Image (cartoon, helix red, strand yellow):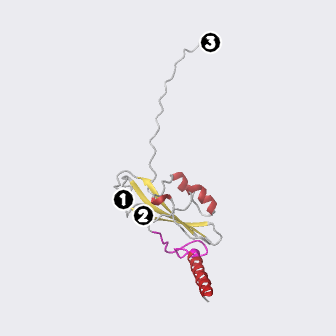
Amino acid sequence: MKTKQIIKAGLSLLAVSLLAACATKSDVKADGTTENPVFPKPYSLTFNKGRGTFPTFDELEKMKPGLTKDDIYKILGRPHYDEGMFRVREWDYLFHFHTPGVGADPENTSGVEDVTTCQYKVIYDKNRYARSFHWNPVFPKDAVCPPPAPKAEPEVIIREVEKTPRRIRQ
């Protein structure tokens, strides 16, 4: 009798955990869109020990609809949050950008100044191709995500021109 109860309880627990793993946080449609993207708590990262990463603007420019999960993994790395086990249709990241003049985020234990923090969500369609991308400012709360790319300083090249005497043809 006890063995049957243990087996039933185990199967029930397994079924609940599998259903939870299949669920997405946002209401994702088959075409890979959502009206209301749901972001996880900013500093509840599963990977990177709560730190997030600093993407380059070149990496962000490569993000476009139609990429596969492998493509995005190669560009941005693994998602920073635990998204579940089966039929995952959204990946979340925590990104930081160097932005002079921004104070330190009180919720970030690093206490580093001049950093804007944003969450980034990639949503996949039913065939697991990236279809929509969403930003959520974390700090400052009204930040533009991603912040504008820093303008490159014009490169000045100074070179000396060696003057050689010209030969006159005769």
Residue 22: say if magenta.
yes
Residue 75: say if magenta.
no
In the rendered image, which quarter is residue 128 located in?
Answer: bottom right
Residue topped by disc 1: 105
Q: Is residue 60 shown to the viewer in this render? A: yes
Total number of numbered labels?
A: 3
Residue type for callout 1: Asp
Q: Residue furthest top?
A: 170
Residue topped by disc 2: 137
Mark-to-mark CA distance, 1 and 2: 12 Å
Mark-to-mark CA distance, 2 and 3: 72 Å
The magenta region covers 21-40
Is 144 placed above or below 14 here?
above
The mark lying in front, picked from 1 and 3, is: 1
- Mark 2 and mark 3 in contact? Answer it, CB < 8 Å: no
Q: Residue furthest right?
A: 127
- Among numbered discs 1 and 3, the one appearing first in the sequence: 1
Majority secondary structure of the magenta segment?
A: loop
- Mark 1 and mark 3 in contact? Answer it, CB < 8 Å: no
- Among numbered discs 1 and 2, the one appearing first in the sequence: 1
**Residue 26 or 145: which is nearer the viewer?**
26
Residue at figure coordinates x 55%, y 57% from the top left: 76
Residue 42 x %, y %: 44, 65
**Rendered image: mark on residue 169:** 3
Residue 28 x %, y %: 56, 74
- Among numbered discs 2 and 3, the one appearing first in the sequence: 2
